[in-house]
């Protein structure tokens, strides 16, 4: 017996990845898949990979989705999720939002970074941050999931256990991340055409990136703080399709050793099938996680500056978006957590 | 009237780049080009790009070079330069070393990072650090040039003017760099074959990298300190052939503004043809400097953390190695500084 | 109830892909995985992707494999399969060879292209060519499977139905193929390091490539000929990790139309889940098949020269090697044909 | 004493390459550079590589160009060249057109492939095909140069000497070409964004490509025919920025040997500094020609099918466009032919 799934706004790369996973999932049927632009066209028009499938895009119809589906994934550009989330939650569906709309707990932060009031403040507190390794219990009974961003996933997973264990300081954190080009979505713009990205490495958004408050929020939570922290987040675009590497620099607290770091990870992730912690002094590599839902974490200490240096690798479209979203769905519906993801 | 040039150890990528530049140079003839491995073979055996050229590799013969040449470039693996430098300096040649052998002023630092005593300590103080934008006057009369490393060039050029102007602190500096694969040399090893590098992003050498003391030395000099500083240098390998991007985080001193940063760069680089400073808030991009001798610099201030954020881009083989080496040669022989480099 | 699987010679890319598929397969357990070089080391030493798995390499032990396994995959370099195939076939195991050792029916052709006598001529006639879309019935009862090469798979699948239908001539065929670098195996050699492959396109092996007789053999079979044919096969190396595109030029016979080509494909592949034929006048694209077991086929007719132009795309490691091998295993053991492959 | 140069339509990749070459040229000043879209903006707005240069785009003003310039390069999209060529030729300027507008001698062929009448048929016969290795004498006195396309350059240079020598047949020629993405121009379109090109190989335009009649015209000329020939031209897009590899299959005539091919090339290209013929049985590689004006040619004979197999490599933006255009300018103005190009 399968659940019926709707995907709203599926014409981007996260939507494609969601379809790739869901068509493989044995307990979920894609019942509705919407795109205003491609309504009535077969999915294969946009994604030739699905040639032969019967799936067709339709214009979004909230009533019909409410009647026929159990869960809906929202894969929309920023700012549009509320319009769908409110009626579908009321209709009793589980709503899993892949956008940034419900990730921040603070409406003030939302306004600061998105330059407008949040349209449904009450949903901010209701939403559960969809990172199973941190919030599995809350996800089980959640109605609304705010899926973490790709950069936040790659930053929070390696950092949180060390903050929780008090091994590193929540102050002075630096996250230097390199993302593949699918991280910008399926956008058609001059800086994204092949000759402008290939043989190019460049930083962007190093001040006030929209993923910044989400990272700070979750790092502060992990550190058990009820004050804000300020970190430096330095994103870069590199010429790969998929994958984010984050290199994270933290001030080591007294008594922090490689052994204690290893223990903190063991405690946090020993039973996690989608987090892989390497031996001390190794480095994560995006090529070992692309097309998987895994986060690979590596760690070291630099005695020269007394810093802990972490590296992490995820696939931005899988663990950084659609894979993690399906992982949440599996938890909510009490399926095997890895169903569709291996 | 041309000078006669010898290149010792030319079979790597820096050697190839040196040849590319020198064969275009109108006042320098490549008289000798050595490689033990490829002795007596035409250069085109190793570098098909030079098919049609008469150049042949020979086994290195110090006496012959001493007799026939005016200047010698050493493009050897670490640790081998002294053997050639001493007799050739004695014979009155100018010696331009592209390796790391003479870059550190401190024999102790050399031993710490290279695990052996330096074989010619007296040359460490004699050598001039071959960065024309910082040491042009000394280069004019230098006999031995220690060409800067690629990472150091990309770190020091953007940072030094701000340290000199007192706009940023020499403490707590973080340099996160991404290098193309030619930066590892023309090494044949499993981690460097195409499928292991393509679609891969990874950090390496984040603790005690051999370029670290060189960066710290020059940053301390720029800050006018007679004490050591400790920075974090975080190198990464990214799937491009050529190019280094460095993103540098510095603690802003009181009174540091975008305007003052702009002025400091104006003062330092207004007359430099190989340094290009972008408007505030832009980002450097390696694709605009590859196959050129330029360093592109961009800057911003993050008020959230009170950090100055710099980005820089160079071609690791040109401004980061062979191009800068020829720039030094041009200064020494009073040629136009850009000869062969445009 | 699962079958027990041995993989011999698993340290290359085809071995890694085989593991990736088999660890996902619900009716097959990887019982033995051998590598002389890495004996006693965890699989994750070679393939960090499998960190966390219990799998360990062992030295190959034919007796132990014979006792404990139902099927063995041979992923060895050319010329080594016979040594394992003979005793394991005698012990009653199914043997699936991914190398080229049993693909040719003619011992003479084998000698011509491999410069030595075939060590077990009798196995050449016994072996079934492991291309399910052409030989499914024979595969069901086969003991020894000779898995097709990657280039042959990409050439034969699009061509055979048209040859069978008599729409094109078996003479004068030209196959121009472009392969990703994993197609050369996990070889460590100067021409394969990243800077030598990236931003490079080059032909190689355009005369007497070892995949040539296999392509000619199967095309002649498809055309129902009992004579040899001679084709031109033009392989190229392009800077992608995975994927082969083949563009195939054939002389159209009288009466050949786009409609008839479409019908021939419909007849051949309508029920094939791993062959996807695009509408007329489109082009296959490797990016739609990588990491899948699909072959994508497109077709057109050039009235200017009266040629049929086919393009095909496969993943060289999946449909071109390990995926097709598992597809054969599934057929032999009467599993769902797509098990582990979706 | 320098000539004054205008570049009309300079905002694409061929325009950027033209600027790169001309700013290095010691006898040519870029006096005017036009772009309607970017009028009054510094060139560095579009091409940051030229930051620091004084060059500004202006709206095209034929009168002003006529008064101030000696030569004009037209780097416009198809169909727009005539409008500028007529008045500027009348004003006595040399006109070098990089588009396809004047390459075909036959107005009928033009109409067949461009679906409209040629706007200035008389210019078709006046224009000289700008391939110095074939038409140097005519170029010397030409007023209007039709620069060859990138694919045609890569096809004609290797083929023409063998056709002229009667070593191969002009019938049944197959050209399979792989082009980098700058070959499509600086177009912003979904199929050209990085994630759609990277890790992708695909054919396109295999029937009736607009470069086809130009290739056929020049091959027929080389063969000394006064009839048309029909070839198959199979272009592919591969994930590199720059470079075209063409693999060309020709029917060997009686008596064709490797030696005779070598001699034919020797006769044609011994004195050509921008054509490099490799030893028999080697392969050209785009990485040895990118950022140069060279065409690298390699050859072999396949006795199995009696075909001559040629491979060639050029940089599509240099020898395939702007470099060859400047080479023509150098010939017209009696400069050293390599000025600006080495």
Image (cartoon, coloured by chain):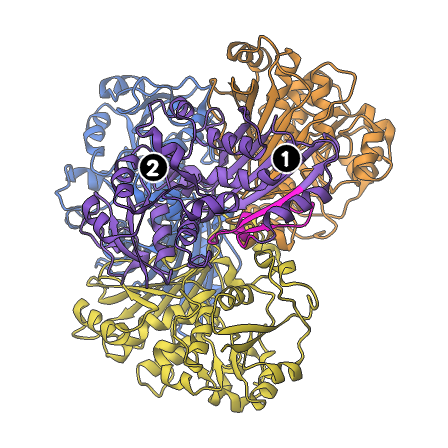
Chain colours: A orange, B purple, C blue, D yellow
> Residue extending furthest top?
A255
The subunit carrying tag 1 is: A
> In front: B312, or A4?
B312
Residue receiving disc 1: A234
Query: Which SS class for mark 2?
Result: loop
Query: Which SS class for mark 1?
Result: strand
Which percent across, then down, holds residue A93?
Answer: 78, 29
Q: Is residue B296 magenta?
A: yes
> In front: B306, or D127?
B306
Q: Give left or right: position of B9 versus C52.
A: left
Residue receiving disc 2: C186
Does residue C239 appear in the picture of this structure? no
The subunit carrying tag 2 is: C
Q: Is residue D241 above or below residue D220?
A: above
Does residue C197 appear in the picture of this structure? yes
Magenta range: B272-299
Q: Give left or right: position of D241 versus A235.
A: left
């Amino acid at each position: 017996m399968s659940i019926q799934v709707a995907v709203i706004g599926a014409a981007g790369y996260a939507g494609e990845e969601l379809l790739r996973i869901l068509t493989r999932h044995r307990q979920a049927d894609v019942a509705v898949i919407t795109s205003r632009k491609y309504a009535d066209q077969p999915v294969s028009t946009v994604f030739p990979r699905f040639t032969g499938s019967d799936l067709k895009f339709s214009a979004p119809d909230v009533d019909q989705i409410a009647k026929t589906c159990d869960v809906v994934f929202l894969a929309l550009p920023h700012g549009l999720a509320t319009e769908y989330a409110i009626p579908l939650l009321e209709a009793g569906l589980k709503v899993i939002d892949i956008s940034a709309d419900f990730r921040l707990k603070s409406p003030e932060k939302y306004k600061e970074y998105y330059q407008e009031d949040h349209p449904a403040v009450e949903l901010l507190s209701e939403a559960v941050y969809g990172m199973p390794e941190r919030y599995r219990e809350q996800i089980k009974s959640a109605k609304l999931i705010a899926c973490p961003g790709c950069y936040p996933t790659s930053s929070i997973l390696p950092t949180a256990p060390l903050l929780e264990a008090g091994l590193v300081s929540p102050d002075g954190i630096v996250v230097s991340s390199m993302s593949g080009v699918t991280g910008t979505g399926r956008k058609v713009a001059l800086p994204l055409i092949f000759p402008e990205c290939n043989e190019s490495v460049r930083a962007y958004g190093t001040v006030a990136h929209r993923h910044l408050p989400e990272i700070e929020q979750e790092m502060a939570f992990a550190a058990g703080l009820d004050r804000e922290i300020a970190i430096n987040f330095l994103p870069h675009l590199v010429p790969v399709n998929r994958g984010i590497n984050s290199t994270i620099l933290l001030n080591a607290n007294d008594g922090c050793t490689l052994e204690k770091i290893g223990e903190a990870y063991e405690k946090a992730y020993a039973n996690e099938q989608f987090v892989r912690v390497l031996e001390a002094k190794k480095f994560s590599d995006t090529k070992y996680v692309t097309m998987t839902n895994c986060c690979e974490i590596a760690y070291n200490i630099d005695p020269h500056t007394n810093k802990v240096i972490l590296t992490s690798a995820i696939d931005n479209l899988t663990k950084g978006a659609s894979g993690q979203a399906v992982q949440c769905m599996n938890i909510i519906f009490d399926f095997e957590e890895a169903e569709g993801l291996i």
